[in-house]
Every structure is written in structure tokens, then in C-alpha cells.
Amino acid sequence: MLREIKSTQRKVRHLYFKVTGTGTAVIDQGGQDAVLVDNGTGSYKLTFVTAGQRLLAASVLCIADAGDITATLDATSDKTKLEIRLWDATDGTTAKDGVFYCEAVLSDDADPR
């Protein structure tokens, strides 16, 4: 007996980036999936080449050569970009350039189930 199965399998995409934000900021890994904008010291925007319908998860991991760095991550409501800000961990308020890894898990299915 033949049966039809309709499923998008949630169309999940896992994107991974390594960004060197010191000097001229560049995407070292994952550059085919996003465009990087350096908005000034410690402030970066990754815009996805192909937007998702839903951003399921995102995270940032910093690598500090000199001193500690913390990061804040803002996933915008339109699911097309991530705003990343790096801070000097000693005071938490001074912007600081650095190297970071970022991953994002997107779904190309708008159904929230």
C-alpha cells in the first residue's frame, strides 16, 4: 500500500563561523554563509546569506589573547542577522576587539511545532 508522507523535517541548518575581529575584521571560517560588518571596536554584525524562518539557537565563544573577553549576542526578530558585542571582562563596559566563534541553528520551516 502506497502512502503519502509530507514532512519538511523542520529544514534545520547549522551555521558556524570563526571571526577575527582584530585589525581588519574577517570571517575566517563560514564566510560563504554570512557577511560580516565591523561596526567599530568590539561590535560586529553577521548577516546570513540565506535567511531562516526561525532562529532556533545561537551562541558565541570568545578567544582572548590578552585578557578576558565576554560577549553579548542579539538575535534580531527578522532572523537574518546576529549582532555580537565583545567586552573587556575586567570591567564589563569597555568594548574590545577579539577573536570569536559563533554558531547559529536556523529552521527554514515557519511552523513553530
Image (spheres, rainbow, N blue to C red):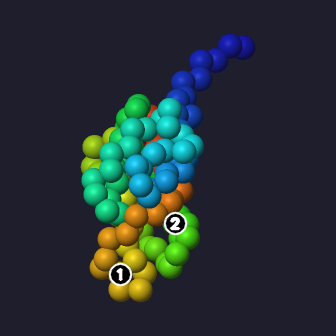
Q: Which residue is mark 2?
A: 62
Comes first in the chain, label 1 or label 2: 2
Label 1 crowd bin: few (<14), some (14–19), many (20+), radius 10 Å = some
In the image, what residue occupies the spot 57% across and 43% down? 29
**Quarter of the view holding residue 1:** top right
From where the camera sits, is residue 70 visible?
A: yes
Q: Is residue 37 left or right of residue 108?
A: left
Mark 2 lies on a secondary structure that is: strand
Position of residue 62 measured from the top left corner of the image (x, y, whole percent): 52, 66
Q: Give the CA separation, mark 1 to mark 2.
A: 14 Å
From where the camera sits, is residue 110 visible?
A: no
Mark 1 lies on a secondary structure that is: loop
Labelled disc at residue 92: 1
Label 2 crowd bin: few (<14), some (14–19), many (20+), radius 10 Å = some
Give the amino acid at mark 2: Cys
Give the amino acid at mark 1: Gly
Q: Nearer the viewer, residue 13 or 32?
A: 32
Position of residue 25 measured from the top left corner of the image (x, y, whole percent): 41, 50
Position of residue 77 measured from the top left corner of the image (x, y, whole percent): 27, 49
In the image, what residue occupies the spot 55% across and 70% down? 65
Q: Is residue 74 left or right of residue 68?
A: left
Q: Nearer the viewer, residue 17 or 6?
A: 17
Q: Nearer the viewer, residue 1 or 35?
A: 35
Position of residue 97 measured from the top left corner of the image (x, y, whole percent): 40, 64
In the image, what residue occupies the spot 45% across and 45% down? 26
Residue 5 vertical position relative to residue 55 in the rendered view, above or below: above
Q: Residue furthest right?
A: 1
**Quarter of the view holding residue 52:** top left
